[in-house]
Amino acid sequence: MNKQVAWVSSLSAVIAGFCCLPSIVVVLLGVGSISFAADLANLFYGQYKWAFRFVGFCAWCLGMFFYLRYTEHVCSIMDVKKNWVRVRNLLVMSFSLFVLLYLFWLYVVLELIGKFLGIW
């Protein structure tokens, strides 16, 4: 796996974890209070977490499509069939990285920052 695939997985994981980031930004910029940030986090994470995850997954799919098409030159179904093992391994590794980075970003990094700021 190269840097471009890692970049696609990382960016998609950050996009999928945007549900908790706005509340942290609100507190750090001083735009709102901690109670407002907590309500915002409850709203985004409580009701819209699946929407954020879906957008992150769509970003990963789109990124991998463009990577395979323009970097690996897998442009047709016949190319996918010819290179199936390589394409499958790349997609599995990239998706695994996406999931692991999402879990680390949301449940470690943002969780620790939110606890430090007193939001949750």
Image: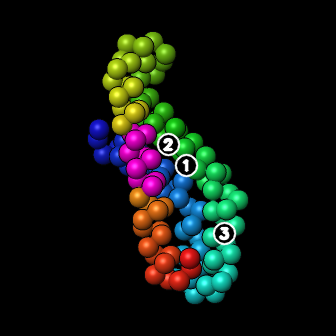
Mark in the foreground, 1 or 3:
3
Measuring from the top left, give residue 98's x and y in whole percent. Answer: 43, 46
Query: Which amino acid, by three-letter code, is at mark 2?
Result: Trp
109 sits left or right of 119 in the view:
left
Q: Nearer the viewer, residue 74 or 48?
A: 48
- Residue hosting label 1: 56
Q: Which residues are magenta?
A: 94-103
Which tag, 2 or 3, sits closer to the chain's start? 3
User: Is the Cβ of the residue at disc 2 closer than 8 Å to that at disc 1?
Assistant: yes
Q: Earlier in the sequence, mark 1 or mark 3?
A: 3
- Is label 1 in a helix, a strand or a loop? helix
Question: Residue under circle 2?
Answer: 60
The residue at 40%/50% (across/down) is 100
Q: How many numbered markers are drawn?
A: 3
Residue 78 position, x and y percent, is 45, 12
Q: Between marks 2 and 1, how big is the CA–CA gap?
A: 6 Å
Relative to 89, does residue 35 appear above or below in the rendering?
Answer: below
SS class, disc 3: helix
Which quadrant of the figure contains the N terminus? top left
Report the disc number at residue 42: 3
